[in-house]
């Protein structure tokens, strides 16, 4: 079945450091891929998405490229801020699916001043 | 736009009682709502999918008689945890998807349930 695997956290970085959070997936066909962010005490928010191979999703300085050959959708940001501290979830919706999201386990990011 | 609210945000109840959690789409009509459960430091687990006016579809392993889901209108879905036990303590999150919104789900802020 479909699944998503994320790197274990927590990830602790200093402000302005480069961020990479790895995400790989297993799915048949051509899933749509998503990154969601959950700030402390809040619900999940869609950060970015990509719906086909080689698409790059981007938002608020974050980017992720849909790599079919490596079944990956790694999240990157060139310079993190303290306000980026949150839990990040990689997720997919399988092709032909009814829209059910399959989530990775989440990666906690802590950015220190 | 696309705001989803949940009520209550926190609830503490005694073992054996039932608790109802509401999920509302505030500025759009939600044809489909999803209910998730999130364990500490773990991912979200989809419990069920509900389409307005029809019975919810439960994921494997989720007891439909224990977690009653009603989606009676295009802006409201409810999850009732019946005869709650301490192991039901968790963070419950709903999401909503409207017509024409393709895959995008809008998430509520979650409800922290503690059963004593």
Image: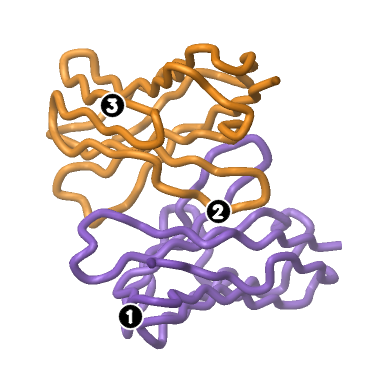
Chain colours: A orange, B purple
* The quarter of the displayed image where residue B74 is located: bottom left
Q: What residue is at 71 percent from the left and 77 percent from the top?
A: B18
The chain identifier of the residue carrying mark 3 reads A
Q: Residue at x 69, y 66 (%)?
A: B9
Of residues B2 and B62, the one drawn nearer to the viewer in this rendering: B2
Residue A5 % position (x, y): 42, 24
Label 3, residues with CA under 10 Å away: few <14, some 14-19, many ≥20: some
- Horizontal and vertical percent position of residue A2: 30, 35
Residue A58, quarter of the rendered image: top left
- Percent position (x, y) of residue B29? 32, 78
The CA distance from mark 2 to mark 3 is 26 Å
Q: Secondary structure at mark 1?
A: loop
- A13 relative to A91, above or below: above
Question: How far across and down, in percent of the image, does residue B95 sit?
Answer: 44, 62
Which residue occupies the foreground of this view, B37 or A45? A45
B88 and B23: which is toward the camera = B23
B43 vs B59, left or right, is: right
**What is the number of the mark on residue A81?**
none
Q: Which residue is mark 3?
A: A26
Please tell me whether residue A11 is drawn above or below residue B11 in the rendered image. Answer: above
Around disc 2, counting alpha carbons within 10 Å, would you say few (fewer than 14), some (14 to 19), or many (20 or more)? many
Residue A20 picture quarter: top left
Task: Calculate the distance from the C-alpha at mark 3 to the C-alpha at mark 1.
Answer: 31 Å
N-terminal of the pair, mark 2 or mark 3, is 3
Q: How many marks?
A: 3
Residue A43: mark in rendering: 2
Query: Which chain is mark 2 on?
Result: A
Q: Nearer the viewer, mark 2 or mark 3?
A: 2
Question: Which residue has dot 1 on it?
Answer: B52
State the quadrant of the C terminus of chain A: top right
């Amino acid at each position: 079945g479909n699944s998503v695997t994320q790197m274990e956290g927590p990830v602790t970085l200093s402000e302005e450091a480069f961020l990479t959070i790895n995400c790989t997936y297993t799915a048949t066909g051509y899933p749509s891929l998503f990154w969601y962010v959950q700030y402390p005490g809040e619900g999940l928010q869609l950060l970015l998405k990509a719906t086909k191979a080689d698409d790059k999703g981007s938002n608020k300085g974050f980017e992720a490229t849909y790599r079919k050959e490596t079944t990956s959708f790694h999240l990157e940001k060139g310079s993190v801020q303290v306000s980026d501290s949150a839990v990040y979830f990689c997720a997919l919706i399988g092709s032909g699916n009814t829209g059910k999201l399959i989530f990775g386990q989440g990666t906690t990011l802590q950015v220190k001043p | 736009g696309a705001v989803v609210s949940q009520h209550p945000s926190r609830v503490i109840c005694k073992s054996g009682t039932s608790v109802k959690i509401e999920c509302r789409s505030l500025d759009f009509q939600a044809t489909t709502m999803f209910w998730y459960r999130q364990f500490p430091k773990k991912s979200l687990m989809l419990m069920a999918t509900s389409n307005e006016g029809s019975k919810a579809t439960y994921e494997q392993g989720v007891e439909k008689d224990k977690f009653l889901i009603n989606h009676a209108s295009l802006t409201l879905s409810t999850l009732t945890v019946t005869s709650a036990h301490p192991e039901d303590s968790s963070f419950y999150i709903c999401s909503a998807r409207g017509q024409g919104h393709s895959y995008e789900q809008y998430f509520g802020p979650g409800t922290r349930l503690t059963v004593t």
